[in-house]
Structures are given as structure tokens and as C-alpha cells.
Image (cartoon, rainbow, N blue to C red):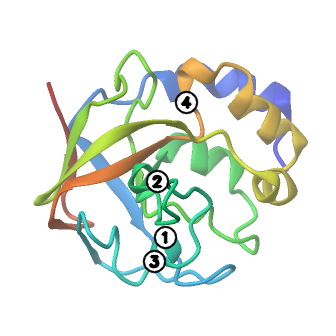
Amino acid sequence: MISRFDLDAALPHILAAPKTDAAIATLCLRPAFGERSFPDRITMTRAEGIPGERWATLPWSRLADGTPDPRIQVSLLPTRVMNLVWQDRSVPHPGDPIVADLDMSEANLPVGTLIKAGTAVLRVSDLPNDGCVKWKVRYGADAMAFITADPRLRLRGVLCSVEQDGEVTLSDRLQVLR
């Protein structure tokens, strides 16, 4: 596992990620806990989030009426953070549906920002993606402390709702809509 010293040393590189026009490193589907598949394309809809993903059946956040919270339909993780913490590839992939080389800080992606992902459009949520106990177990206490040290940097990435149905592929790039 990577040390906090090495993580802190990499922070300037992480913060230098593109502000838009971001290359997509991986697409991931999580049909159930502990399961991952890596397709070349994923479909996203307002009604279902990512069909086949566990958001519709096992969301960690629900609305007052018990339905899945649309603000957590899609999570985005910065490629540069993933590459730092996920060094032991025998450990499960973080599971974020889109990993992209994008600056996900509050300064670059304020709440409500729209992001074009292929033909889909996502909206940055007001809910923080501050990691979970699985992140700490998989990537270490230093990696957990690093991603939570300054919430404004959003080193764990962002959560989004689907605003426009569409499809994203590995050859697409994320475009921040200003």
C-alpha cells in the first residue's frame, strides 16, 4: 500500500489533471457487491442509472419514499488517484463506473455542473463521495486519510445523477459543460 508521504508528493500531479476533455481510463459495472465487469460501453438513463448496476437494487442512499437516490447514480473517480492507490491489482478495482483523467475539485466541478459523457449528460451531485470502509481496507489507512484530508479537492471523485439518457464508450472523453 502506498504511504501518505508518497500520496502527498503526488498531489501536484493529481491537481494538474485536465479541467475538461478528459480521457476515460476504465468503465466498470458493479452488478452486485464484490462483482466487477469492464465493458467497452455503458448505457445511462435517468430512470435506471446504469442498467445492470446495483444502484437500482442496493443503493447506499434512498429518498424519503424509499426509492434509490438519483444523486448517486454514477460515480466518477480521477484516474491519477486510482493509479496511485490501486497498485496491487489483485485487490478489487474501486468500482466507479467511470474513471477519467479529470480535475474533480469543487473549483472545477461545482455542485450542479453538467458533464457530457458520450451521448449522456451527468450532473455533479451535492452529496460527497468521501470513501467508505472498503476503500480503507483495500488501499490502506493512508489512502483513506489522503482522500478525506481536504474535501474541496474531491480526491475520491464525484457522484452524479443522469440528466440525459445516453451511452459512453472508452473512446469518448468527458466534457465539462460550462
Q: Depth-wise, is mark 1 or mark 4 nearer the camera?
A: 1
For label 3, the SS is: loop
Q: Is residue 46 above or below residue 158?
A: below
Position of 52 relative to 90 (above/below):
below
* Residue at the image position 59 percent from the left and 40 percent from the top: 156
Residue to which mark 3 is pinned: 53
Contact flag, marks 3 and 4 (Cβ < 8 Å): no
Q: Which residue is mark 4?
A: 154
Front-lying residue, 100 or 125 = 125
Q: Secondary structure at mark 2?
A: helix
Task: Look at the numbered disc 4 and give the secondary structure of its residue.
Answer: loop
Residue beneath label 2, please? 72
Q: Tell me the CA gap for discs 3 and 2.
A: 12 Å
Task: Kindly indicate whether the residue at mark 4 contacts the one at mark 1 (C-beta within 8 angstroms).
Answer: no
Q: Residues within 10 Å of mark 4 (few under 14, many from 20)?
A: many
Res 141 quadrant in image: top right
Mark 2 vs 1: CB contact within 8 A: yes
Q: CA distance from mark 3 to mark 1?
A: 6 Å
Q: Amino acid at mark 1?
A: Trp
Labels 2 and 1: the sequence-earlier one: 1
Q: Is residue 87 above or below residue 160?
A: below
Above-or-below relation of 69 to 16: below
Instruction: Find out whether the residues at labels 3 and 1 contact each other: C-beta distance under 8 Å.
Output: yes
Q: Amino acid at mark 4?
A: Arg
Task: Pinpoint residue 96: horizontal percent, then vertical percent.
Answer: 51, 60
Using the numbered discs, state the Cα–Cα distance from disc 2 to disc 1 in whole angstroms.
8 Å
Few, some or many C-alpha atoms within 10 Å of disc 2 (few <14, some 14-19, many ≥20)? Answer: many
